[in-house]
Image (cartoon, helix red, strand yellow):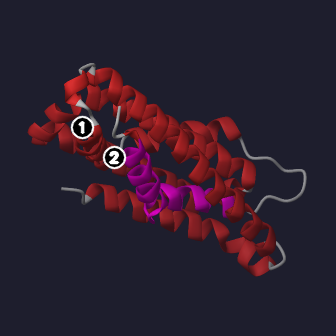
Amino acid sequence: MPHLEAFLSAAILLTLLPGPDNLYVITRGISQGRKAALAAAAGFASGCLWHTLLATLGIAALITQSPTAFNLVRYAGAAYLVYLGIRTLLDRSGFALQQDGQQPDLWQVYRQSVLANMLNPKVTLFFLSFLPQFVNHAEGHVPQQMLVMGVLFMLQTMLIFGLFGWFAGHIGQWLQRSPAIARRIHLLAGSIFCALGLRVALVK
């Protein structure tokens, strides 16, 4: 795979760019601490394997050719994010700033992050268009090459998102010093999730 270095360079650059995924992780880190952010980062990274599999099997191409299938995935993902946002707005306890000794449900954070990533058709289309550009067709084994790149993309995503979440956790600790902000952090988190859901719904 002679294009591997170019692939990793492009993947890291794209992961560093501001987007809904890393914003989601940062929101978790600020509101629920570093462990929750790391769980969210692991969830989004795991979702990369799902999109790699879709691109490798050609299912993503079928979705792009079927407006009905694309809309089903798009609206399902948007509805899920809006659901998380509304639930967060109504139930402040789930996204209140964590005090010492309190721990969020990390498994739940991970599951929600995986599902949010899987139901984002924009990510599916990205993998469909991104991975094939770095495949060495002369060497053959195209599916295997795409799977390798998908795993590498997952690993670097986990590392970068994990760093985002780690520093966001420090911001959350700083915000704990301001009770007024701490009481309203769930409003910020819920609003961000709803906005991300609307963004997914508007993907064309």
Tell me which segment is drawn in magenta: 5-31
How far is mark 1 from mark 2, CA to CA? 14 Å
Badge 1 is on which residue?
A: 132
Q: Position of residue 169 (x, y in %)?
A: 73, 61
Secondary-structure class at tag 1:
helix
Question: Which residue is tagged 2?
Answer: 123
Is residue 57 left or right of 86 when viewed as pictured? left
Q: Residue at x 84, y 50 (%)?
A: 102
Query: Does any portion of residue 51 appear in the rendered image?
Result: yes
Q: Main secondary structure of the magenta part?
A: helix
Please say if 57 is above or below 152: above
Give the amino acid type for the residue marked by disc 1 in the picture.
Pro
Residue 114: mark in rendering: none
Mark 1, mark 2: which one is toward the viewer? 1
Nearer to me, 91 or 12: 12
Residue at 65 percent across and 56 percent down: it is 163
Asked if disc 1 and disc 2 are in contact, CB closer than 8 Å, the reply is no
The quadrant where residue 182 appears: bottom right
Asked if residue 58 can be seen in this view, the reply is no
Q: Is residue 29 magenta?
A: yes
Please provide percent x and percent y for residue 137.
20, 28
Where residue 202 sits, quadrant-wise, is: bottom left
Residue 160 at x, y percent in the picture: 58, 53
Q: Residues within 10 Å of mark 1 (few under 14, many from 20)?
A: some
Choose between 150 and 125: the one closer to the eye.
150
Q: Secondary structure at mark 2?
A: helix
Up-down relation of residue 83 to residue 164 (above or below): above
